[in-house]
Image: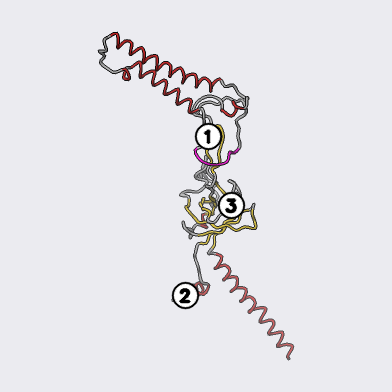
Amino acid sequence: MRLKSRRALLRFVLLFVVPAIALVAGGHYWVKNTRYVATENAYIKAHHLAISADIDGRAKKLIERGVASRAKYDEAERNLTQARQATRTIGQKIQQVKARLGGQLDIPAERHPMFLEVLARRQQAALNLRRTRIVAPADGIVGRVSLQAGEYVEEGKAVLPIVQAGENWIEANLKETQLTYVRPGQSARILIDAYPDQEWTAKVISISPSTGAELSVLPPQNASGNWVKVVQRVPVRLEFGRVHDGLPLRAGMTVSVSIDTERDRSLFRMMNSALADITGK
């Protein structure tokens, strides 16, 4: 008799108590985890600056190394020198004409059309000489350089790319179904694949106004009979909080993002709400 009661108790525990505990624990875990939105489809981004030449010619560094001809660089210097000499010559000629006419001229020498024309050429030559030196608009690291030694650089051609330093952020591509409670200003935990032992903090800055597919060169056209619903992804921008010294962040690195939506739900409130819906109260 005692053995039967033990078996009945064990059967009751296995059939009712254990499933009830598992259900409550699973429901509590599900409720708590809906607070966080996570994705591994996220990458570190940085500003890429294209340095272009303002005039035709060759880079000065190539000239100093003896790789390329100094023809264009020397030509700019010669043009500036000739313009200066021409300016002085025209000024002297105007003064001579003025002296022959007894000094009776309607306009001063510095406003004479010939003088102004040569002065404009001189200023243009000086500007071209300054443009032979290309200056980066911001601090950064030079990326892949496609310019070969001795190659002629045309005006407006991109000479080299620069990845701006100290301006990294994270672009997380979240599913549209995950954006329900994501808002700017929410905190996030970041794990970078290159540094798995370090945890980073970040903050949601903005959410893209359109999906990544809409921003592509050829956006998809769904006006067809063979349409299949696909969950779209929306880029979300996050900025780093505390940065670990000695761990460089490189554009394109893969990261894992977990955003705290601050949405705290109670399992008991959900059960009461479900019970109220069933009973109609």
Q: Which mark is residue 41?
A: 3
Q: Is residue 20 above or below residue 200?
A: below
Foreground disc of the pair 2, 1: 1
Q: Position of residue 191 (x, y in %)?
A: 60, 56
Q: Is residue 138 magenta?
A: yes
How far apart marks 3 and 1 lie (CA) works out to: 30 Å
Which element is circle 3 on?
strand
Q: Which residue is mark 1?
A: 51
Q: Pinpoint residue 35: horizontal percent, then vertical percent.
A: 53, 64
- Relative depth, front residue between 152 and 30: 152
Sequence-wise, the earlier of marks 3 and 1 is: 3
Which amino acid type corresponds to the residue marked 1 in the rendered image?
Answer: Ile
Helix or strand or loop: what does disc 1 sit on? strand
Is 184 one of the magenta-colored residues?
no
Label 2, label 1: how far apart the Cα atoms are = 66 Å
Report x, y in % for residue 56.
52, 24
Q: Are marks 3 and 1 in contact (CB under 8 Å)?
A: no
Please tell me which residue lies in front, 11 or 258: 258
In this rendering, the answer to whether 36 lies above or below 140 is below
Label 2: which residue? Answer: 276
Task: Identify the residue at the far bottom of this view.
Answer: 1
Label 2 or label 3, whichever comes before in sequence order: 3
Q: Which mark is residue 40?
A: none
Image quadrant occupied by the N terminus: bottom right
In terms of secondary structure, where does tag 2 sit?
helix
- The amino acid type of the residue labelled 3 equals Asn
